[in-house]
Image (tube, rainbow, N blue to C red):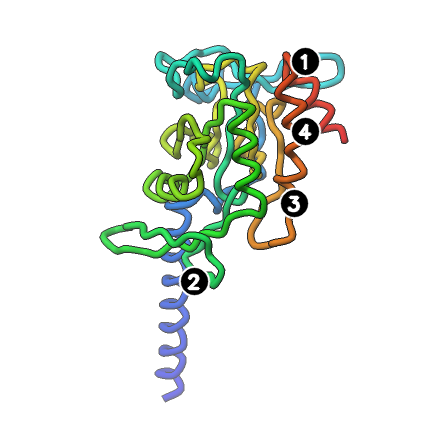
Amino acid sequence: MFVLLLTRVYVCAVTDALKKQRNRSIFSSLFCCFRSYNVEPPTSNNNTSPLPPLEENGGVQKGDQTRVIAIPHPPTKYLLPELKASDYGKKCVVIDLDETLVHSSFKPINNADFIVPVEIDGTIHQVYVLKRPHVDEFLQKMGDLFECVLFTASLAKYADPVADLLDRWGVFKARLFRESCVFHRGNYVKDLSRLGRELSKVIIIDNSPASYIFHPENAVPVQSWFDDMTDTELLDLIPFFEGLSNEENVYNMLQRLCNR
């Protein structure tokens, strides 16, 4: 009897563990939330690196600092289309989705702004989406000042309908999803050199340092957001981007931001 009881306890524990693992697997396969942020920059040894050309990056020594840059292996086809006439003279801002503009969950959220049905393995799952405070004002202002591109490591079947609901003004001139990322050391990296825009005029806004590990000097880091409705980070960034839109080269102003 005691052995039978122990067997039942063991079976229940294994079953629960498998359920949790499956739920986590479904979530991580759809969103980009379950990622390792402890990723190192690519090595500088070009001759021995086993990575394909688009993942080869290196360090260039400048004084006592090492600046991580993409080794010039231009792709045969860029990720973005030709610049529209209405965006000539504007810098390109690459904007992340999850934990930067919104937070999404399979668990019901009472105050969800959107509920998006997503099919996974033949089953429809409801995804509950919360908008980060001031995201509407932020996006409208960014659309006035920049050529805006949504770039997320999430799957298009989730991110595309969320972007439809989020961007009511047509701010995003292009949308890039997981397949446009470079898979590097367990992370989906957004390689800005593949966009087809001059890097000195490109900015990326992202909560994950792993996403812009190839071009940290182009990044405006933001805190990950989940459900704090008193958050003002997007609102606070608007004056900074207004100033940045008038800069000829983005690196000096971004460097000052990082040194604050």
In the image, 46: left or right of 234?
Answer: left
In the image, 39: left or right of 172?
Answer: right
Mark 3 near mark 1, Cβ–Cβ under 8 Å?
no
| Residue carrying label 3 | 232
Quick one: label 1 or label 2, which is nearer the N terminus? 1
Quick one: label 3 or label 4, which is nearer the N terminus? 3
Q: Which image quadrant: the N terminus?
A: bottom left
| Residue carrying label 1 | 61
In the image, 189: left or right of 250?
Answer: left
Q: Position of residue 159 (x, y in %)?
A: 39, 41
Q: Residues within 10 Å of mark 3 (few under 14, many from 20)?
A: few
| Residue carrying label 4 | 240
Is residue 191 in view from this perspective? yes
Q: Amino acid at mark 3?
A: Thr
* Camera-nearest residue between 145 and 60: 145
Is residue 45 in view from this perspective? no
Q: Amino acid at mark 2?
A: Pro
Between label 2 and label 4, give the one nearer the viewer: 4
* Camera-nearest residue between 210 and 1: 210
Q: Residue at x 70, y 12 (%)?
A: 62
